[in-house]
Image (cartoon, helix red, strand yellow):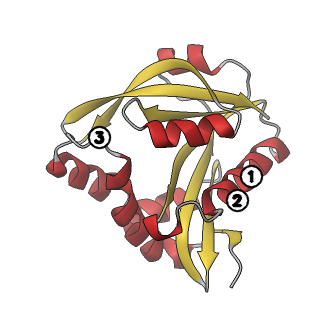
Amino acid sequence: MAMSVTRASDADAAELAEVATATFPLACPPMADPADIATHIAAHLSRQAFGAHLADPDRVVLTAREDGRIVGYAMFARGVGDDADIATAVGPRPAVELSKMYVLPTHHRGGAAASLMQAGLDWAKEGGAAAVWLGVNRKNPRAQRFYGKNGFAVTGTRTFRLGNGTEDDFVMVRTV
Protein backbone atom coordinates (compact mmCIF):
# COMPACT_ATOMS: atom_id res chain seq x y z
CA MET A 1 0.00 0.00 0.00
CA ALA A 2 1.17 3.54 -0.70
CA MET A 3 2.44 5.91 1.94
CA SER A 4 0.01 8.65 2.95
CA VAL A 5 0.51 11.75 5.05
CA THR A 6 -2.41 13.02 7.09
CA ARG A 7 -3.00 15.37 9.95
CA ALA A 8 -3.15 13.50 13.26
CA SER A 9 -6.28 13.48 15.40
CA ASP A 10 -6.96 12.81 19.09
CA ALA A 11 -7.59 9.17 18.20
CA ASP A 12 -3.91 8.90 17.15
CA ALA A 13 -2.38 10.00 20.48
CA ALA A 14 -1.66 6.50 21.82
CA GLU A 15 -0.15 5.26 18.55
CA LEU A 16 1.93 8.44 18.22
CA ALA A 17 3.30 7.82 21.73
CA GLU A 18 4.22 4.25 20.74
CA VAL A 19 6.07 5.44 17.64
CA ALA A 20 7.78 8.19 19.66
CA THR A 21 8.93 5.69 22.28
CA ALA A 22 10.44 3.51 19.55
CA THR A 23 12.08 6.30 17.55
CA PHE A 24 13.22 9.06 19.92
CA PRO A 25 16.13 7.04 21.37
CA LEU A 26 17.50 6.59 17.84
CA ALA A 27 18.16 10.33 17.60
CA CYS A 28 20.00 10.49 20.91
CA PRO A 29 23.79 10.26 21.12
CA PRO A 30 25.05 6.83 22.15
CA MET A 31 26.39 8.21 25.43
CA ALA A 32 23.01 9.67 26.48
CA ASP A 33 21.82 8.24 29.78
CA PRO A 34 18.91 5.82 29.17
CA ALA A 35 17.21 7.21 32.30
CA ASP A 36 17.33 10.73 30.81
CA ILE A 37 15.85 9.43 27.56
CA ALA A 38 13.04 7.69 29.46
CA THR A 39 12.35 10.84 31.49
CA HIS A 40 12.09 12.91 28.31
CA ILE A 41 9.76 10.40 26.65
CA ALA A 42 7.50 10.31 29.72
CA ALA A 43 7.33 14.11 29.92
CA HIS A 44 7.07 15.08 26.25
CA LEU A 45 6.11 12.05 24.17
CA SER A 46 3.45 10.28 26.20
CA ARG A 47 -0.16 9.77 25.11
CA GLN A 48 -1.15 12.71 27.35
CA ALA A 49 1.60 14.92 25.91
CA PHE A 50 0.44 14.15 22.38
CA GLY A 51 -3.12 14.97 23.45
CA ALA A 52 -1.90 18.43 24.50
CA HIS A 53 0.13 18.86 21.30
CA LEU A 54 -2.88 17.93 19.18
CA ALA A 55 -5.09 20.44 21.04
CA ASP A 56 -2.64 23.32 20.52
CA PRO A 57 -3.91 25.58 17.69
CA ASP A 58 -0.34 26.70 16.95
CA ARG A 59 0.84 23.14 16.20
CA VAL A 60 0.24 20.53 13.57
CA VAL A 61 1.12 16.87 14.01
CA LEU A 62 1.42 15.02 10.72
CA THR A 63 1.51 11.26 10.36
CA ALA A 64 3.01 9.06 7.68
CA ARG A 65 0.91 5.93 7.36
CA GLU A 66 1.33 2.67 5.58
CA ASP A 67 -1.47 0.10 5.63
CA GLY A 68 -3.28 2.36 8.10
CA ARG A 69 -0.47 2.24 10.69
CA ILE A 70 1.60 5.25 11.71
CA VAL A 71 5.20 4.69 10.60
CA GLY A 72 6.43 8.22 11.27
CA TYR A 73 5.34 11.64 12.41
CA ALA A 74 6.36 15.27 12.38
CA MET A 75 5.30 18.17 14.57
CA PHE A 76 5.51 21.77 13.45
CA ALA A 77 4.83 24.72 15.79
CA ARG A 78 4.43 28.41 15.09
CA GLY A 79 6.97 30.66 16.78
CA VAL A 80 10.54 30.88 17.93
CA GLY A 81 10.31 30.68 21.71
CA ASP A 82 12.07 32.69 24.37
CA ASP A 83 15.65 31.48 23.88
CA ALA A 84 17.75 34.44 22.72
CA ASP A 85 20.30 32.22 20.93
CA ILE A 86 17.55 30.59 18.88
CA ALA A 87 15.86 33.90 18.14
CA THR A 88 19.15 35.26 16.78
CA ALA A 89 19.83 32.14 14.70
CA VAL A 90 16.39 31.87 13.12
CA GLY A 91 16.34 35.09 11.18
CA PRO A 92 13.22 35.62 9.01
CA ARG A 93 9.88 35.97 10.79
CA PRO A 94 7.27 34.72 11.24
CA ALA A 95 8.90 31.34 11.80
CA VAL A 96 7.74 27.79 12.39
CA GLU A 97 9.69 25.21 14.38
CA LEU A 98 10.05 21.67 13.15
CA SER A 99 9.78 20.35 16.68
CA LYS A 100 9.83 16.62 16.01
CA MET A 101 10.31 14.30 13.05
CA TYR A 102 10.77 10.58 13.53
CA VAL A 103 10.27 7.54 11.33
CA LEU A 104 10.38 3.89 12.37
CA PRO A 105 13.68 2.29 11.32
CA THR A 106 11.81 -0.22 9.15
CA HIS A 107 10.69 2.72 7.01
CA HIS A 108 13.93 4.69 6.77
CA ARG A 109 14.74 5.59 3.17
CA GLY A 110 11.18 4.79 2.15
CA GLY A 111 10.00 8.34 1.54
CA ALA A 112 8.11 8.85 4.80
CA ALA A 113 10.42 11.58 6.13
CA ALA A 114 10.49 13.42 2.80
CA SER A 115 6.69 13.29 2.59
CA LEU A 116 6.32 14.54 6.17
CA MET A 117 8.81 17.33 5.49
CA GLN A 118 6.99 18.52 2.38
CA ALA A 119 3.60 18.47 4.10
CA GLY A 120 5.01 20.44 7.04
CA LEU A 121 6.71 23.00 4.80
CA ASP A 122 3.43 23.41 2.94
CA TRP A 123 1.59 23.95 6.26
CA ALA A 124 4.16 26.57 7.30
CA LYS A 125 3.96 28.41 3.98
CA GLU A 126 0.16 28.36 3.92
CA GLY A 127 0.22 29.84 7.43
CA GLY A 128 2.40 32.74 6.28
CA ALA A 129 5.74 31.60 7.70
CA ALA A 130 8.90 33.05 6.22
CA ALA A 131 11.16 30.34 7.66
CA VAL A 132 11.21 26.93 9.32
CA TRP A 133 13.81 26.14 11.95
CA LEU A 134 14.84 23.10 13.98
CA GLY A 135 17.34 21.88 16.51
CA VAL A 136 19.35 18.75 15.71
CA ASN A 137 21.89 17.05 17.94
CA ARG A 138 25.46 17.83 16.88
CA LYS A 139 26.23 14.10 17.08
CA ASN A 140 23.47 13.09 14.66
CA PRO A 141 25.06 13.45 11.21
CA ARG A 142 22.39 11.33 9.52
CA ALA A 143 19.64 13.78 10.51
CA GLN A 144 21.86 16.74 9.63
CA ARG A 145 22.37 15.33 6.12
CA PHE A 146 18.63 14.82 5.67
CA TYR A 147 17.86 18.38 6.76
CA GLY A 148 20.64 19.74 4.55
CA LYS A 149 19.16 17.91 1.55
CA ASN A 150 15.88 19.63 2.37
CA GLY A 151 17.35 23.12 2.23
CA PHE A 152 18.22 23.68 5.89
CA ALA A 153 21.52 25.29 6.88
CA VAL A 154 23.22 25.61 10.26
CA THR A 155 22.74 29.14 11.59
CA GLY A 156 23.54 28.74 15.28
CA THR A 157 23.56 26.50 18.34
CA ARG A 158 21.44 25.76 21.37
CA THR A 159 21.40 23.43 24.33
CA PHE A 160 18.64 20.87 24.79
CA ARG A 161 17.56 19.39 28.13
CA LEU A 162 17.35 15.62 28.01
CA GLY A 163 16.12 14.52 31.42
CA ASN A 164 18.86 15.62 33.81
CA GLY A 165 21.39 15.93 31.00
CA THR A 166 22.16 18.67 28.53
CA GLU A 167 22.77 18.04 24.84
CA ASP A 168 24.26 20.37 22.25
CA ASP A 169 22.23 21.05 19.11
CA PHE A 170 22.75 22.90 15.89
CA VAL A 171 20.00 25.29 14.91
CA MET A 172 19.16 24.85 11.24
CA VAL A 173 16.93 27.16 9.20
CA ARG A 174 15.43 27.32 5.72
CA THR A 175 13.15 29.88 4.13
CA VAL A 176 9.77 28.84 2.74
Mark 2 touches mark 1? (CB < 8 Å): yes
Q: Position of residue 85 (x, y in %)?
A: 49, 15
Q: Residues within 10 Å of mark 1 (few under 14, many from 20)?
A: few
Residue pictured at 43% horizontal, 68% vertical: 19
Residue placed at 84% from the left, 47% from the top?
126
Residue under numbered circle 2:
115
Give the mark, 3 or 2, whose residue is nearer the N terminus: 3
Quarter holding the C terminus is top right
The residue indicated by pointer 1 is 118
The N terminus lies in quadrant: bottom right
How packed is label 3: few (under 14 Cα within 10 Å), some, or many (20 or more)?
few
Identify the residue position indicated by label 3 in the image.
29
The residue at 34%/64% (across/down) is 21
Q: Position of residue 28 (x, y in %)?
A: 32, 45
Q: Is residue 18 above or below residue 135?
A: below
Q: Residue at x 38, y 47 (%)?
A: 27
Residue at mark 2 to residue at mark 1: CA–CA distance: 5 Å
Q: Nearer the viewer, mark 1 or mark 3?
A: 3
Q: Which mark is residue 95?
A: none
Mark 2 belongs to which amino acid? Answer: Ser
Residue 131 in the image: above or below residue 106: above
Q: Please provide percent x and percent y for residue 135.
A: 49, 33
Report helix, strand or loop for mark 1. helix
**Please, what is the three-letter code of the amino acid marked with disc 3?**
Pro
User: Dot 3: what SS?
Assistant: loop
The residues bearing labels 1 and 3 have C-alpha atoms spaced at a distance of: 26 Å
Image location of residue 119, percent across then percent down? 74, 56
In this rendering, position of residue 90 left or right of residue 17: right
Left or right of 66? Residue 40 is left
Q: Identity of the amino acid at label 1?
A: Gln
